[in-house]
């Protein structure tokens, strides 16, 4: 997934906002809370920087992804006990998994909002 594709995916979610901060990272929020960050990760052998995507995970996914190739605990966030993962493998084979984890991050963060704010934003509502 390219940075443009990442931004298009996040922009299509309900009640999201976008800001560029932290050295040019694309920071996506739902209800004012961060759910995804697109930035630059480690350098490739040729010196170019690869895209890297950060997202919140469940405890189980954090444990699994922390030991999976192409992922690592998100710098800064994970060191403070938060369950955030950084995907540092931008190969197309990882796109489907990234889509899943971004959707999960969005869901987890939106569920952490107050019920009142969820209602105001039209999130997590059970259809009548």
Image: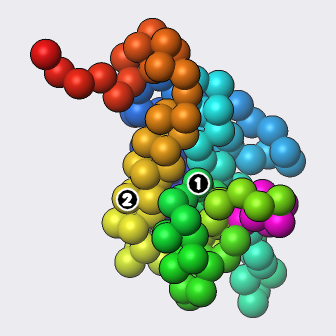
Q: Quadrant of residue 27?
A: top right
Q: Position of residue 2 (x, y in %)?
A: 52, 58
Residue visible at 43% across and 73% down in the picture = 94
Q: Position of residue 42 (x, y in %)?
A: 76, 75
Residue 62 seen in render? yes
- Distance between mark 1 and mark 2 Cα atoms: 12 Å
- Of helix, strand and loop, which one carries label 1? strand
In the rendered view, tell whether residue 94 sits above or below residue 46: above
- Which label is found at residue 100? 2
Residue 90 seen in render? no
Report the span colored magenta: 74-79
Residue visible at 38% across and 78% down in the picture = 93
Specify which label sits upstream in the sequence, 1 or 2: 1
Asked whether the residues under the numbered discs 1 and 2 touch, taking CB atoms below 8 Å apart as contact, a structural biologist would say: no
Q: Which residue is denoted by mark 1 in the rendering? A: 56
In the rendered view, tell whether residue 19 sits above or below residue 117: below
Residue visible at 39% across and 68% down in the picture = 97
Q: Position of residue 74 (x, y in %)?
A: 72, 65
Quadrant holding the C terminus: top left
Q: Is residue 48 magenta?
A: no
Q: Residues within 10 Å of mark 1 (few under 14, many from 20)?
A: many
- Of helix, strand and loop, which one carries label 2? helix
Q: Is residue 75 magenta?
A: yes
Q: Nearer the viewer, residue 34 or 39?
A: 34
Judge from the rendering whether residue 59 lies leftward or rightward of residue 92; answer left or right: right
Q: Nearer the viewer, residue 91 or 33?
A: 33
Q: Nearer the viewer, residue 58 or 104?
A: 58
């Amino acid at each position: 997934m390219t940075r443009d594709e990442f931004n298009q995916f996040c922009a299509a979610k309900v009640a999201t906002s976008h800001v560029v901060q932290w050295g040019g990272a694309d920071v996506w929020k739902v209800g004012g809370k961060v759910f995804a960050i697109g930035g630059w990760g480690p350098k490739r052998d040729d010196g170019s920087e690869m895209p890297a995507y950060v997202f919140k995970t469940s405890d189980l996914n954090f444990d699994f992804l922390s030991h999976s190739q192409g992922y690592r605990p998100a710098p800064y966030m994970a060191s403070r006990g938060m369950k955030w993962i950084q995907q540092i493998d931008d190969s197309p084979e990882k796109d489907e998994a990234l889509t899943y984890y971004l959707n999960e991050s969005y869901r987890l963060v939106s569920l952490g909002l107050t019920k009142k704010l969820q209602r105001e934003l039209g999130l997590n509502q059970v259809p009548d």
